Amino acid sequence: MSGHSKWSQIKHKKAKTDAARGKAFSKVTRLITVAARQGGGNPETNASLRIAIQKAREMNMPQENIEKAIKRGTGELEGVNYEEVIYEGYAPGGVAVMVEATTDNRNRTTAEIRHIFSRRGGTLAESGSVSWIFERKGLISFEKEDVDEEELMMVAIEAGAEDIEEGESTIDVITPPSDFDRVREAIEHAGIPYVLAQVTMLPKTRVNLEGKTAQQVLELIDALEEHDDVQEVYSNFEIADEILESLSS
């Protein structure tokens, strides 16, 4: 987990720049709209909407923007009709990749995602090709130097954490999706600082990478994440922290 978790933390920190925040606002607005259309506008009864709103708040999105996105989803305001699409494929080195997108033109988005894969040494595959490798989990990540490991483990386990994984410089608390909010709130109440908290897709098996292949995979992941329609990219690579830091600098 450590390599992939560390890369997620690096990306999260980069997303705080003004330019990246503008694109992130646009993406999470779509996410809120789709969630509200599929499950209703009440976050207390719509888990997907609740998670999307939490994501928006972590980006400091104005409440007015959140409310408008919900209303577009419920039909109270006019807006573009987005649909969710999931793409599956392989990156160099046999790394599995899943892409979650929201689009108003499936054919256009599919062609563009296929082009990104092929241009960077990957392959877009059939539905079901790699989805079995992943399972939905809650993930809360910490920098080791910022936390008391014993306190974190005690709080997380008591709140219902499923597993705790230690990397070279990170600690990851894994939860069932249904327990994510409770565990995160317990950690926040204890005053333990985390770097990343999200419901995500975690791989059951991982592929260790280094050298040129590691760089190629990260370039493919970056290109996919930069696409305006892409919400999330999941993969099962494992790269040493020092290699990640050097490639991201």
Image: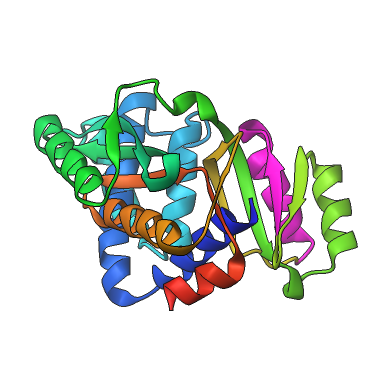
Q: Is residue 86 above or below residue 156?
A: above
Residue 3 belongs to the span the image colors magenta: no
Q: Give the quarter of the image for residue 105.
A: top left
Tell me where residue 192 sits by quadrant.
bottom right
The mark total stands at: 0
Task: Indicate left or right for 64 with 44 as reference.
Answer: left
Residue 87 image point, x, y percent: 31, 32
- Dominant secondary structure, magenta: helix
As displayed, is residue 39 above or below residue 152? Answer: above
Q: Quadrant of residue 19?
A: bottom left
- The residue sitting at 42% across, 56% down in the picture is 213
**In magenta stretch: residue 178:** yes
Q: Which residues are magenta?
A: 171-191
| Residue ranking furthest to the bottom | 249
Q: Is residue 240 above or below residue 204?
A: below
Q: How far across and down, in percent of the image, does residue 221 sit?
A: 36, 53
- Residue appearing at x 65%, y 41% in the figure: 180
Q: Position of residue 173 (x, y in %)?
A: 71, 49
From this view, report whether residue 146 is shown above or below residue 236: below
User: Quadrant of the image for the C terminus?
Assistant: bottom left
- In the image, 67 versus 46, the foreground residue is 46
Residue 70 visible in rendering: no
At x 15%, y 38%, the residue is: 109
Give whichever of 192, 131 is nearer the camera.
131
- In the image, is 19 to the left or to the right of 161? left
